[in-house]
Amino acid sequence: MKITGSVLGVLVLVAALTALAAGGVKDSGLAKEKYDAAVENLLIGLASDNLGLRESAAFMLGELKADVAVIPLMEMLRSDDHESSRVVAALALCRIGEGRGVYAVKRAASFDESETVARRCAWFYDQYVHPGSFDFIPADSEASVVKEFAKR
């Protein structure tokens, strides 16, 4: 009796996970309603005054590849006062992969006033969008990025 119940439970779990995967949006594994709700809540978080919430929301919008977030993320990349926020926005835009957003990252790689932001934008563009596109990046730039994060 316990074995039959266990087998039935596993079958129900597999069926539920298969239904979620089949109804997922943009490979997120979420059903459309849950995906839409998550994106809506993350867009609200993106407009927050709380730096951590804003950056976390930007990162997750990139992970979900939410096309509707491209314009707010471009605004964050262009005008946020915090370098870390601009870097997260650039990563999210490259992960989403929409043309306007990746073009904004490419431009920020050349024109952002912060060398750190510009270097990271170039690296994200090179890694996620068009490998080998930024020849001006020194070979040790990845190592320097790793060293910077190791210091923290």
Image (cartoon, grey):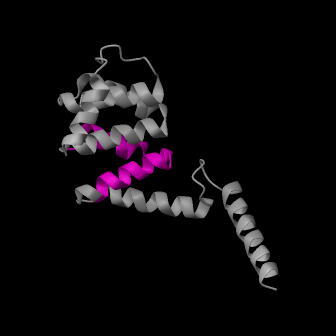
The single residue placed furthest to the top in the displayed view is: 135
- Is residue 150 left or right of 22 when viewed as pictured? left
Question: Which x, y percent locates residue 73?
Answer: 36, 44
Residue at the spot 29% in from the left edge and 39% down from the top edge? 87
Residue at the spot 79% in from the left edge and 76% down from the top edge? 8
User: Of 105 and 15, which appears nearest the observer?
Assistant: 15
- Main structural element of the magenta stretch: helix, strand or loop? helix
Q: Find residue 151 and report its image quarter.
A: top left
The single residue placed furthest to the bottom in the displayed view is: 1
Residue at the spot 61% in from the left edge and 59% down from the top edge? 32
Q: Is residue 111 above or below residue 12?
A: above
Residue at the spot 43% in from the left edge and 28% down from the top edge? 127
The answer to if 9 sits in the magenta stretch is: no
Does residue 2 show up?
yes
- Is residue 3 left or right of 102 when viewed as pictured? right
The answer to if 76 sits in the magenta stretch is: yes
Q: Which residues are magenta?
A: 53-80
Q: How many marks?
A: 0
Q: Find residue 85 and report its image quarter.
A: top left
- Is residue 21 left or right of 135 when viewed as pictured? right
Q: Is residue 119 above or below residue 139?
A: below
Does residue 79 show up?
no
Q: Is residue 26 above or below residue 98?
A: below
Question: Which x, y percent locates residue 99?
Answer: 47, 30
Question: Which x, y percent locates residue 1?
Answer: 82, 86
